[in-house]
């Protein structure tokens, strides 16, 4: 019997591929000077006058850069946000500075971004696994179940990552503005983050619908067969009973 939902697996793969592309744009931000990587950052802020800081600082995934994602630092895994300036800096917003990251970053911002940074990578790993499992989903329900499970796990970590990222950089922007400095969120990084999350959510739903739809179709066919068999057996019994009564009447 042909599957009634064969289009769902390829459609899920398209959304999942889109989610992966946007995730890679975030992770590779500031790696090259090409669009959109040179325009992808989480926050841009006026940091002039802060000890050891650039006039304008942009926070990317691996780097802390100047305007236009130029003059970047060396790549760091989960770089403390306070690496934009020197330890115990003067003129920095007090809310952002603390004893973490070499006396550059407060407890809240140090751990919010560190965990958010890691969860982005975990979401990427499970999204890749779900993508390859999606090709098996084109063949049957088991593949859809595996791909759906991987996509849901990726969605779980992706949700944590974008939530922590949003909370950290929105509060950081507000701290700069409260200190009388210009600051703005990176539209590309935020757009890619939440766009990737939305595409992953749609892909996970489609994988799960693919499992349910196939089960309902085959279940309906089996149920219809049982009903037809039951009706035929009832008619046979009635016919037998009627014949039995006729025979009995004849002998009477």
Image (cartoon, rainbow, N blue to C red):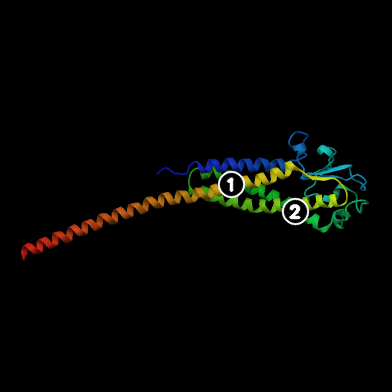
Q: Earlier in the sequence, mark 1 or mark 2?
A: 2
Real-space Cα distance between discs 1 and 2?
A: 24 Å
Q: Secondary structure at mark 1?
A: helix
Residue 34: image location, x then y, percent: 76, 33
Q: Nearer the viewer, residue 12 or 166?
A: 166
Q: Residue furthest bottom?
A: 252
| Location of residue 62 (image quadrant) | top right
The residue drawn where x is 63% and y is 49% is 126
Give the left or right position of residue 216, taking residue 86 as reference.
left
Other-residue count near label 2 (Cα within 10 Å), few / some / many at <14 / 14–19 / ≥20? some
Is residue 181 visible to the viewer in this orientation of the structure?
Answer: yes
Q: Which residue is mark 1?
A: 202
- Residue 13 is situated, as x and y percent measured from the top left of the image, at 57, 42
Task: Identify whether 197 is placed above or below 245.
Answer: above
On residue 83, which mark appears? none
Residue 246, given in percent of the width and then of the height, sits at 11, 60
Task: Quarter of the image for the N terminus: give it.
Answer: top left
**For the residue labelled by badge 2, is the local secondary structure a helix, a strand or a loop?**
helix
Q: Residues within 10 Å of mark 1 (few under 14, many from 20)?
A: some
Instruction: Provide residue 234's location: percent of width, then percent of height.
Output: 24, 58
Side of 68 relative to 15 (left or right): right
In which quadrant will I find the C terminus?
bottom left
Q: Which residue is mark 2?
A: 167
């Amino acid at each position: 019997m042909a599957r009634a939902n064969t289009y769902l697996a390829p459609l899920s793969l398209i959304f999942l591929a889109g989610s992966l592309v946007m995730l890679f744009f975030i992770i590779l931000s500031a790696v090259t000077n090409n669009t959109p990587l040179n325009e992808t950052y989480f926050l841009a802020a006026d940091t002039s006058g802060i000890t050891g800081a650039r006039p304008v600082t942009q926070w990317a995934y691996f780097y802390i850069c100047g305007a236009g994602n130029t003059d970047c630092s060396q790549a760091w895994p989960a770089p403390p946000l306070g690496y934009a300036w020197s330890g115990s800096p003067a003129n920095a917003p007090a809310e952002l500075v603390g004893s973490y990251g070499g006396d550059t970053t407060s407890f809240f911002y140090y751990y919010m971004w560190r965990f958010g940074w890691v969860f982005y990578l975990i979401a990427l790993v499970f999204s890749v696994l779900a993508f390859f499992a999606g090709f098996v989903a084109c063949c049957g329900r088991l593949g859809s179940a595996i791909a759906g499970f991987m996509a849901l796990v990726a969605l779980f970590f992706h949700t944590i990552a974008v939530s922590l990222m949003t909370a950290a950089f929105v509060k950081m922007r507000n701290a700069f503005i409260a200190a009388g400095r210009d600051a703005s969120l990176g539209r590309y990084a935020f757009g890619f983050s939440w766009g990737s999350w939305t595409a992953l959510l749609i892909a996970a739903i489609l994988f799960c619908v693919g499992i349910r739809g196939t089960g309902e179709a085959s279940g309906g066919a089996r149920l219809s067969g049982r009903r037809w068999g039951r009706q035929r057996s009832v008619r046979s019994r009635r016919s037998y009973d009627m014949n039995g009564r006729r025979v009995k009447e004849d002998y009477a």
